[in-house]
Structure formats: C-alpha cells, structure tokens
Image (cartoon, rainbow, N blue to C red):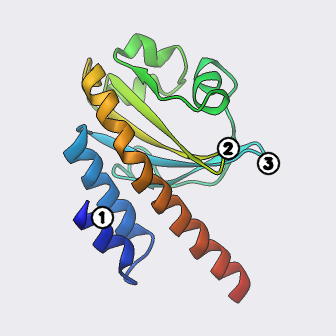
Amino acid sequence: MTEFSTALATADNQPETTYRSLENLVRDTIGVRLFTLMEVDQKRGVVWRSYTNMPDAYPVLGEKPLLQNRWSEIVEGRHETFVANSIQEIAEVFSDHELIRSLGCESCLNLPIVIMGHLRGTLNCLDVAGHYTPERVAAAQSLKTAGAAAFLLAGAIRKQGEENG
C-alpha cells in the first residue's frame, strides 16, 4: 500500500499515476491480466472507462448506458462483487466475451467501489479461467479503500478542471 499512498500524494500526471499504482496493488493482491476502471453516474444512467492496461483492446472511451442484467443486479443493485470463473459465465453478462477470451482471459472479478452509499465505479479484473478463487475474492475486499481514493481523486481533478475551465 506504500507505493499506492505515494502515488496518490504526488502531483505528477494525475490521476494516471494513481491508476497505474492501483493496478500494481491489484496485481500484487489478487493477480490480474486485464485491468480497467469503470466509473458510474447512476443519476444519468451512464458508465465510462477511465483507465485500462490494454488500451488497444479496451480504450478509454466516452460514456455508454448502464447494463441491465444479472451483473447490474449484483454490482449496482446489491453492491456485491461479481465473479465469473469461466468464459461461459462471462458470456452470460458481457457481449464482448469473444474479445475477452482472445486476450487470454476467461475469468473476471468486478469489485464495486461504493462511496457514501452510492456506486462510484468498479475495479474490473480479468485473468485466466478459474483464477478468482474464494480466497482471492476475499482478498479483493481489501482493495476497496484504494479504489475509493482513486475515484475520489479523479472526481476532484475533473471538478477542478470544470471550475478553472
């Protein structure tokens, strides 16, 4: 967590520096091949990817509508971690399952980051089939504070930009 704390405190290249450090923390804690951050605006019903470690396959893009399926019931509705440990389970909720598989990923863990009772975003972690064991799912819960700090930092930077722009 020391590297993450240092990254969070630096003024250089934010929020990218913090996001990259968060990715390293996730890799060290539970392992991850594809890592993205998805931010949520529930009032407007939209999400956007604010970070990715595979920009060619999953670029940071504009907004898209929130999903309405089993994933949204679990993550948005109940604020619980979504886990799928096979490509078949992923295909049930994500239409981009073929791209996911082509990247060598067949399991995912989506960790909801809830701030003041509202879903602020998710840490999206993908890896080989069967990777997200019950032990790793339990360990992932320790990443929520770092995820919240990263999303709060990004929001503060956006707000500052709006006020100065």
**Residue 150 at x, y percent in the picture:** 46, 61
**Residue 163 at x, y percent in the picture:** 72, 84
Residue designated by label 3: 44
Q: Disc 2 vs disc 3: Cβ atoms closer than 8 Å?
A: no
From what the image shows, is residue 9 above or below residue 130?
A: below
In the rendered image, which quarter contains the N terminus? Answer: bottom left
Camera-nearest residue between 27 and 149:
149
Q: Which residue is painted at 79% across and 48% down in the image?
A: 44
Q: Is residue 13 left or right of 41 when viewed as pictured?
A: left
From what the image shows, is residue 9 above or below residue 94?
A: below
Give the mark toward the camera: 2 or 3. 3
Which secondary structure, mark 3? loop
Q: Which residue is painted at 76% across and 42% down in the image?
A: 45
> Real-space Cα distance between discs 1 and 3?
31 Å
Q: Disc 2 vs disc 1: Cβ atoms closer than 8 Å?
A: no
Q: Is residue 138 left or right of 82 when viewed as pictured?
A: left
- Mark 3: amino acid: Arg
> Of callouts 1 and 3, which one flags the residue occurring earlier in the amino acid sequence?
1
> Of callouts 2 and 3, which one flags the residue occurring earlier in the amino acid sequence?
3
Query: For residue 29, which quarter of the picture?
Result: top left
- Mark 2: amino acid: Lys
Task: Using the image, tell me which numbered label, if any, was put on residue 74.
Answer: none
Q: Which residue is painted at 38% across and 28% down in the image?
A: 108
Residue designated by label 2: 64
Task: Using the image, tell me which numbered label, if any, was put on residue 4.
Answer: 1
> Of callouts 2 and 1, which one flags the residue occurring earlier in the amino acid sequence?
1
Give the mark toward the camera: 1 or 3. 1
